[in-house]
Amino acid sequence: MLITIVEAVLASEDDMDRMLAAARDQITTSRQDEGCISYTFARDVLDPLVLRIVEIWQDEPTLRVHMKSAHRARYLASTRDVTHTSVTARMFDATGERDLKLYITELAAEIASEARS
């Protein structure tokens, strides 16, 4: 079962810069973890003080190993004194994934069919 974690962190400019610098090691090493499908940190285009983090894991056991990893502990230690104005985090599980392009193609065909009716 796929596990997806979605986080949004609002921080000051100085703290954001520190978080991004610390994230480089975290991202590189996490992407090598067994079960890591995707691991991304990105600044929000409309609000550069928001850091969006999206992780996709093969299953909960591989996520648990990651949560206990030395590189995660390093990241948390290096950002421990960062002041987060706001943090939202959600975890989702799914039974599988679907190809988005195929879904859009199928939806377009459905819309076209309904328009002809």
Image: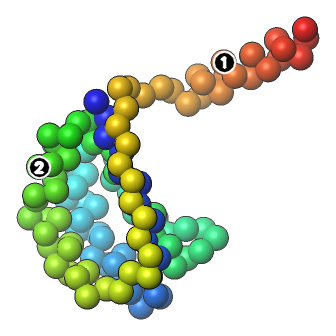
| Image position of 104 with respect to 34: above or below | above
User: Which residue, as the protein is rendered here, is positioned at the far right?
Assistant: 116
Q: Is residue 62 above or below residue 76?
A: above
Query: Circle 1 is placed at which residue position?
Result: 106
**In the drawing, does residue 73 fall left or right of residue 52?**
left
Which residue of the protein is positioned furthest toward the top in this rendering?
Answer: 117
The local crowd at label 2, few if under 14, some if 14 to 19, many if 20 or more residues have their Cα within 10 Å, is: few
| Circles 1 and 2 in contact, beta carbons < 8 Å | no
Q: Residue at x 17, y 65 (%)?
A: 72
Determine the secondary structure under disc 1: helix
- Extreme residue in the bottom direction: 14
In this picture the colour scheme is rainbow
Q: Up-down: is 66 above or below 97?
A: below
Name the residue type under label 2: Val
Residue 87 visible? The answer is yes
Residue type for callout 1: Glu
Q: Horizontally, is 105 left or right of 17 in the view?
A: right
